Image (tube, rainbow, N blue to C red):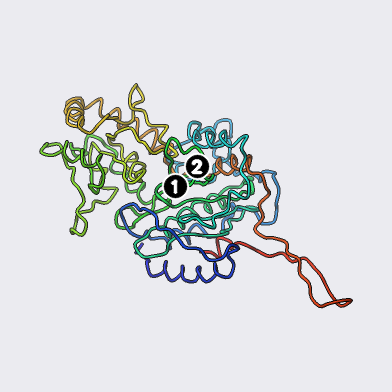
Amino acid sequence: MGTIQSWDYERMSILSSWQKAHNRNGDHACTPSATHDGGLPALRDELLSSNQPSSKHHALGSHSSESHSSKTQLTSQSEWKFDPTRDSFDHSLSDSQCGDAFPDYYAEIDRAAMYYKDRGISEDDMNITERGNVVRAMIYDHQLYIMETHISVQPGIHDLPRMMAILGSINRVIVAHQGYIPDVEFVFSVADAEWNPAPFWTLCRAPEDESHWVMPDFGYWAWDNKIVGSYQQFVLELEDKSDFSKKKEAAFWRGADSNEERHNLLSAAEGHEWSDIEAIIWGRPGNFTRMVDHCDYQYLVQTEGNSYSGRLKYILNCASVVLMRRPHWIESFTHLLQPSGPKQNVIELDDFVELPDAMSYHLSHRKDSENIANNAKELFKERYLTPAAQACYWRKMFEKWAKVQSWDPKPWTIEQRSEGEGKDKKEWEEKVWNGATWELFM
């Protein structure tokens, strides 16, 4: 799949015209977001493939809370167990299968739902008039609507591909699921970190930001074709990279020397034979390494950037040993990191000054290293970071959000119309659509 920058921005100019005509709150300025390294992803193939008609999708217009008929399973429901080989890319697992397969995944959703249990969420909370990097959307009667967008479409700012990736992920979940999905209206942020205390869906949150609902990030759809590609493409390319003994006996990291943590890492690793740790020099040819090629190394170092780092979910798929400081920024899966004990799946350092000692120990204790790598593989690559898990997470988010949402969302308003005067005056009500369906929007 090639880069489609011209397609993206041509389409966004059409979208901008649509917004001017239909935006209920008028025209508003957009605030650029801080971005991850990398350019536009290849979105067209992903968008079109997710939007193909599916026999699994129930007919629109059956607005009911009753479940649709379940798909036939290879085994009975009572015998069903998640099989990574068979089920990792299945976006249509039933609710009970999601619960059985990923019982520990929903901690962040449960936390947010508890936070809003008594507070509730009102329609006024969805007002994004003065806000940037955000999108207001709705699921109504098993259909995704985009109500309002406040993002930057300037070249070099990645709001657009992030927005399309998140919307594509949500629509894929809706189309794949045969059961009930509640009607929900929500606002999500495409910024690296969202500082507004409103109940937005965000890529991550700081520990003190209890008002935010953490969603799966855009990378589970696709990101930068040269470095990552689609998430499915990335996972499939790992099939021949899972043997720990065949990986390079070195620690690998690439990134910008952009904060104190990264600077300390570069200083601690300098001059060691086990180190393949370098800062990216912008503009230098060949200075980037494809994400899948990180997995050629036995040891991978994780650092945070402006906020969370999108790299972590990728390298936890590698069946390598991840060395990191305790993450400050919370993602949907970070509560599953285990830095000690029999199920240890990462090595946690208080500071990167400890990296040389950690590498010295683990290079001489191969079995310990291999156990950590295998634990990470089993928990993340084969379970909680699968596309199937992300679909289940989205649906649980819809479910819990609906329970604290205080209004019944609809993608239209009823407006009073009149014509003529006196005895010839006619009055009627007219349904005015406020959003665009996903099919029209894309």
Give the image location of residue 46, x and y in percent.
44, 58
167 or 126, nearer to the observer: 126
Q: How many marks?
A: 2
Q: Position of residue 291 (x, y in %)?
A: 29, 48
Mark 1 or mark 2, earlier in chain: 1
Q: What secondary structure is marked by label 2? A: loop
Q: Amino acid at mark 2?
A: His
Does residue 225 appear to the left or right of 126 in the view shown? left
What residue is shown at x 70% (from left), y 44% (from top)?
A: 66
Q: Residues within 10 Å of mark 1 (few under 14, many from 20)?
A: many
Q: Is residue 114 left or right of residue 378?
A: right
Q: CA distance from mark 1 to mark 2?
A: 8 Å
Residue 212: give its label. 2
Position of 244 with respect to 115 (left or right) is left
Q: Is residue 56 left or right of residue 83?
A: right
Q: Residues within 10 Å of mark 2 (few under 14, many from 20)?
A: many
Q: Are marks 1 and 2 in contact (CB under 8 Å)?
A: yes
The label number, if any, that marks residue 194 in the structure image: 1
Between residues 48 and 287, which one lies in front from this camera angle? 287
**Quadrant position of residue 25:** bottom right
Residue 62 drawn at (x, y percent): 70, 53
